[in-house]
Amino acid sequence: MTDPLTTSDLFRLTCVVPAYNEAAHLASFVCDLAACLNGITPYFEILIIDDGSTDQTAALIKPILADCSARYLALSRNFGKEAALSAGLDYARGDAVILIDGDYQHPLSLLPEMVALWRSGYDMVFGVIANRDHESMLKRLGTHLLYRLLEGDSRFTIPRNAGDFRLLDRRVVNALKSLPERNRFMKGLYAWVGFKSVALPFIPLDRPSGSSSFDFSALKNLAITGVTAFTTLPLRIWSGIGAAISLTSVIYAAYVAIDTVVIGKTVPGWSTLTVGLMFFSGVQLLSIGILGEYLGRIYDEVKQRPLYLIAEDADNSRIGLKPGEKS
């Protein structure tokens, strides 16, 4: 028989579960998660962030809140996963916070190991996908290019293949909450705040039903947010391209002048002129588009709109106070 927990062994643990149209399996997942957490600490809460679901998520999850020590927060609309995770961090009350998807792809069996690593002194324990063979070639290529771009102009390293499945110490949570930006690329923010971290490899499990709502369009938008939030390399690249084109044009102008004045040839080529104008116009428009992405992000930040809005808060968690602690 194991020894009972002493007061110094007890800690509060929050699990943040973002959900969007996960009615088919979310209730069973929350029950399984509660059973797993109960074996780790009696003081836990499951924080379900409903990111504007349009199915029966709310109706199916509310009856089990009390039995699972869960709290249900419904956002007023779909704000995106990054905003849902931020809402979870804002409302989490645990000494440590675990971020986990509600589709069973993040193994519950790893949670005790995450907590053990945290209690051994790590401030952040993040899951790293050990094998991406289940993903499409296009997604793997896009992910590789994104990380190469971010690594080319960064004073910190964003771990590859690391997602949102992670445990955060309260110090890390408070640091993330202090960051003011609205356009949030959470994978970059986890790395930016630093702290003592360790990777925990895992292989994603199969979803019990349905398919992920995180499609190519969402991946593209997230990648643009990550690039504009954490690197100015695209601007530097196009500045270099502009300088190279300008230098080439100067050299070509000198060649035309010599060819006309010294040799006496006239310059043929309306087609050359047309192709050149089209090419350089395209380069200019592309450059303006890249600059516009950065200006658009600045515009969003200046407006200072809230990252999310809460439409409903049903709190049935029993996280409470630890023995001997005063309110």
Image (cartoon, rainbow, N blue to C red):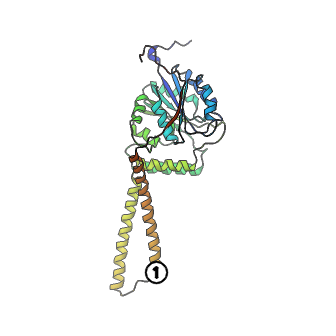
Vertical comparison of 275 with 291: above or below: below
Q: Where is residue 193 shown, x and y percent of the image? A: 39, 37
Q: Where is residue 89 shown, x and y percent of the image? A: 46, 33
Q: Quadrant of the N terminus?
A: top right
Toward the viewer: 91 or 156?
91
Residue 266, picture quadrant: bottom left
Q: Which residue is mark 1?
A: 270
Q: Which residue is drawn at the image coordinates 62% and 35% (left, top)?
A: 57
Q: Is residue 62 left or right of residue 273?
A: right
> How many labels sit on residues?
1
In this view, the residue farthest toward the front is 311
Task: Give neighbour class at mark 1: few <14, some 14-19, many 20+ (Cα, 10 Å).
Answer: few
Q: Which residue is drawn at the image coordinates 38% and 56% (left, top)?
A: 236
Q: Where is residue 201 shown, x and y percent of the image? A: 53, 35
Residue 74 in sight from this viewpoint: yes
Residue 125 in sight from this viewpoint: no
Toward the viewer: 163 or 116?
163
Vertical comparison of 251 with 315: above or below: below
Toward the viewer: 273 or 139?
273
Q: Where is residue 260 shown, x and y percent of the image? A: 36, 84
Q: Which residue is drawn at the image coordinates 40% and 32% (left, top)?
A: 174
Give the SS element for disc 1. Answer: helix
Q: Quadrant of the C terminus?
A: top left
The kind of residue tagged 1 is Trp
In this view, the residue farthest toward the bottom is 264
Toward the viewer: 316 or 271?
316
